[in-house]
Structure formats: structure tokens, C-alpha cells
Amino acid sequence: MNSSIVLLPGDGIGPEIVEQARLVLLKVAERFGHTFDFSSHQIGGIAIDETGDPLPQPTIDACRNAAAILLGAVGGPKWDDPSAKTRPEAGLLKIRKELGLFANLRPIKLFDELADASPLRADIVKGTDILFFRELTGGIYFGESGTSGSGEEETAFQSMTYSVSEVKRIVRMAAQAARGRSNRLTSVDKANVLEPSRLWRRVAAEVMANEFADVQYDVVLVDSMAMHLINRPSEFDVVVTGNMFGDILTDEASMLPGSLGMLPSASLGDGGPGLYEPIHGSAPDIAGKSVANPLATILAAAMMLRHSLGLTEEAEAIEKAVAGVITDGLRTPDLARGDQSKSVSTEEMGAAVVAKLAS
Ligand code: NAD
Ligand code: IPM
Ligand code: MN
């Protein structure tokens, strides 16, 4: 079995949280008798600083040969100059595209004990268990872009494109997942305004009618979805949407389980290595302070074991350990909300998960 895991710690809190996930994976290896072969590579701002390129070729080569990739986050104010020739985020977009990772799975599941960590009322967030499928290698993120003119007439554009095949493959993957869950799929678009959304809506409806007539299917406009998500989150099961809508809706949805620091994601294509990462960014405001919540990255490591390494029992062990530390009352500051007096550090949280795995 290829058990080579590429770590891409990146920028900001990236290195802090990836290290905690690595320690958790080492514990899993020890407990279940596996060997994971880790190697660390550069991406993002740190890669720009050292090589001038946010995704150096050795990183691409290592990722291609890996069983799976675990990424922290990229970006930060140091590299935010709008006139810079490249940006950390370009490295992340490129690795997703290079590896054909068109499906980004973002589970939004509430740990019951965290209902009070949500800024929303506990009775509303109770029962939240949504699986987002965000299309990841198309749409406006990868559309043609450019600038022209000058002064008041200076203009910038970025186009949004979706093809039939791009819509079919993500809708099929989401509908398959719905069959294994509560058998409900919601497609989110902006078909009342955008041409690519009209194509999306038509193709999605065809796929659902022809191949998934057994799955309960509906469509919601994205602006309306932003509202429904915080009004009646427990009514959604699987949600499929385009690249930018999925980016925005899932950060919004992170407030249901209480913190962005709790949400993992898996980026998958047609075979090949998957890429696993928290949905949050490099959190420059808290980087280097040992206060970042490592649980999103630790849960991403669990998704990695399940989806890329076929280690279901091991993935469940990590998820159980995370649930255990939450039940024990451990809270990093983002989860502690009103009561910061008892909050724990990044390292303490990671160590508590490792300890649970040992017990
Ligand atoms: P962010 O997700 O980094 O942070 C938003 C807020 O959430 C901040 O207050 C931050 O402190 C908090 N937060 C995020 N993760 C946390 C964690 N694990 N524990 C506790 N609190 C956490 O978003 P931003 O500030 O808008 O972006 C910062 C940089 O990150 C930007 O350069 C952006 O492009 C980049 N970014 C990268 C990724 C990625 O690498 N996948 C994702 C999103 C943003
Ligand atoms: C994410 C991030 C990225 C995205 C950025 C950093 C390119 O926000 O992974 O959600 O927009 O996809
Ligand atoms: Mn995002």
C-alpha cells in the first residue's frame, strides 16, 4: 500500500495545526500497526519567499506520487500586495487544478455538546448534518480574466463558465453520496441571473431525472440558501453547488457547529491522490500564538484515512477521539466563547486527542 503522505503546512497557523494532525496520525499508526511515510513540502507564501513560486515543481511532483496530501492553509498580509506578480492562493488553486480535484466535500456536522458554541440558538442548530459538494476546478475561479483601460475607465473582468461535463460529474458524485445518507440533494445556483447557472440547473435536473429518480431533489437560489442555512439548517442533507457559492456558503455554515476551526474538507478527483484541508484560512490574526483550533485539520486527517487510504476504522477512531475531547469540555478559545478562563492551547487540544486515541 502507498502510505506516503505529503504535508503542506503553508502559512500562518498552517504549520501549528498540521503538526497536531501529524501527531494524531502517528498515534493512529502506532495503535493500528501502520507506517505512514510523511514528507513536508512548500506551498503558498513561504514558497514564494523561498523560490518565488507559490507552487514549486518539487511540491507538485511529491503530491502526484503521494497517497494523499494534508494541507494547512496559505496566505497572509505579507503577500497581499495587489500589484504583486503572484499570490499564495494561486498555489492552492493550481494544485487543485493540476490534480483534477473537482469535488470538495465539506461536512457541516454539529457535535451536540457544541450547540452552545454556536452564535445561533441551540434549538435551531440542533440536528445539523449537511454534506456540501463544492465544485472546485471550474466556475469563476478559473474563468478568463484581465484588465484594460486606465483611470476612471480602468476595467477588470473575470468570467464564469461551466460545461455540461463539469456539472454532470459533481452532481453525480453528490447524488451518490445522498443515497448513502438521507437520500436528499439540494442544488444551489443563481439561475435567475447567470447563464452558467441556467446550464447548471438544466444539466443537474437531467442527471437527477435520468439516473437518480430515487433521490429527493430540489433547487434553491444562492441568496435564498444563505438565509435558509441559518433558519432551518437541519432540513438539508447533501448540497451541491459551484465553486464560489460553495466557498461562501460553507464559511457561513461553519457558524452552525460553532467555529470555522471545526470544519474539515476533502478534495477529490477521478482516482489519484486526494487533498485534505480545513476549510478555514491561515488566520494571521492568531498565528504563532498557540490558540488555533487544530480539530478541523485533525478531522481532515480522518477524512484522508477514509477516502484515500481506505482506513475506515482508523478514521472513525479519530472522529471518536475528537468527540471525546469535546465531551470532556476541552475548548480552544474560538469554541470557548463566553468563558475563556478554561480554554486550552493548540498543543493541549492536539495532545488530548492523541491521549484519547491511546485509551
Ligand atoms: P481565515 O479563515 O484565515 O480567518 C477568519 C477568522 O477565523 C479569523 O478571525 C481567524 O482567527 C479565525 N480562524 C480561522 N481558523 C481558525 C482556527 N483553526 N482556530 C481558531 N480560529 C480560526 O480567513 P481570512 O482571515 O479571511 O484569511 C486569511 C488568509 O487566509 C487570506 O490570505 C486568505 O486568502 C487565506 N485563506 C486560505 C485558505 C486556504 O489555505 N485553504 C482558506 C481561506 C482563506
Ligand atoms: C478555501 C479558500 C480558498 C478558496 C482560497 C484561499 C483560494 O477560501 O479553500 O475555501 O477560495 O477556495
Ligand atoms: Mn474559503
Image (cartoon, rainbow, N blue to C red):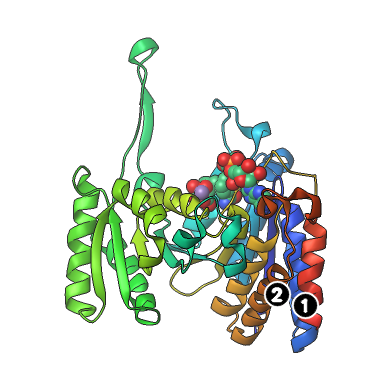
Q: Which amino acid does label 1 sit on?
A: Lys
Q: Along the horizontal axis of the image, is 178 left or right of 56? A: left
Dividing the image into 4 quarters, which one contains the N terminus? bottom right
Residue projecting furthest to the top: 151
Which residue is painted at 20% across and 55% down in the image? 199
Tag 2's secondary structure? helix
Q: Is residue 88 above or below residue 243?
A: above
Give whichever of 312, 203 is nearer the camera: 312
Q: Give the mark count.
A: 2
* In this rendering, the label closer to the viewer, 1 or 2: 2
Q: Along the horizontal axis of the image, is 89 left or right of 77? A: left
Dividing the image into 4 quarters, which one contains the C terminus? bottom right
Q: Along the horizontal axis of the image, is 357 left or right of 199? A: right
Residue 231, horizontal then vertical, whole percent:
38, 54
Q: Can residue 314 be seen in this view?
A: yes
Residue 84, horizontal then vertical, whole percent:
58, 29
Q: Residue 356 carries which label?
A: 1
Residue 25, horizontal then vertical, whole percent:
74, 74
Q: Name the residue under label 2.
A: 324
